[in-house]
Image (tube, grey):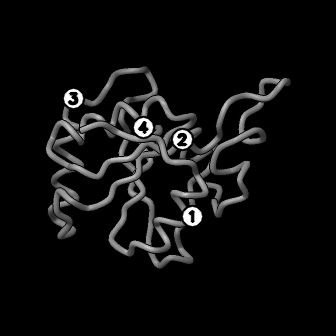
Amino acid sequence: MSVDDVPVEETWARLQSDKAAVLIDVRTKAEWTFVGLPDLSELGRQVVTLEWQSSDGRIDPAFAERLSGFLEQAGMGKSTELFFICRSGARSRAAAEAMTSAGYDRCHNVAEGFEGPPDANRHRGKVAGWKAAGLPWVQG
């Protein structure tokens, strides 16, 4: 099984149409606080926040186990559609691949992430990604 890249607008549409689908933000606590979070309140849901790696760059070796435990407690099986998002799509792809290896068969990487690539002035959030697409988000 492979992880596919899903554009942010398609991710939003699929979250709207599949009430069981989950958006998992794997960025750091500092990013959630200072950069913001996708806002799923109009869908009656919240983003699951679980760091893939700490701010010092260390990958959480228990990530798949911790997320699996959360999903199981929430009554979600291994066929639940899972969308992983980070700043630009690299960490979220790695997290989605880890969950695919853990037996979850509908893992997707949110292409271009929350902020997307930097613009000509090296600022993120303006060229592509969740914020640039005008999708709902809140400051953490």
Query: Image height check: is 95 above or below 137?
Result: above
Query: Image height check: is 53 above or below 31?
Result: above
Q: Quadrant of the C terminus?
A: bottom right
Q: Residues within 10 Å of mark 2 (few under 14, many from 20)?
A: many
Cα distance in 3D space between marks 2 and 3? 24 Å
Kindly identify which residue carries mark 1. 39
Q: Helix, strand, or loop for circle 2?
A: loop
Q: Mark 2 vs mark 4: which is more N-terminal? A: 4
Indicate which label's residue lies in the foreground, 2 or 4. Answer: 2
Please give the name of the residue rendered at 57% of the width and 64% of the height, measured from the top-left corner. Answer: 39
User: Which one is in front, 61 or 22?
Assistant: 22
Amino acid bearing label 4: Ser
Kindly identify which residue carries mark 4. 92
Q: Mark 3 vs mark 1: which is more N-terminal? A: 1
Numbered label attached to residue 111: 2
Q: Helix, strand, or loop for circle 4?
A: helix
Q: Is residue 25 left or right of residue 71?
A: right
Q: Is there CB contact under 8 Å for labels 2 and 3?
A: no
Kindly identify which residue carries mark 3. 61
Amino acid bearing label 3: Pro
Indicate which label's residue lies in the foreground, 4 or 1. Answer: 4
Indicate which label's residue lies in the foreground, 1 or 2. Answer: 2
Numbered label attached to residue 18: none
Cα distance in 3D space between marks 1 and 2? 17 Å
Q: Is there CB contact under 8 Å for labels 4 and 3?
A: no
Q: Mark 1 vs mark 2: which is more N-terminal? A: 1
Amino acid bearing label 1: Asp
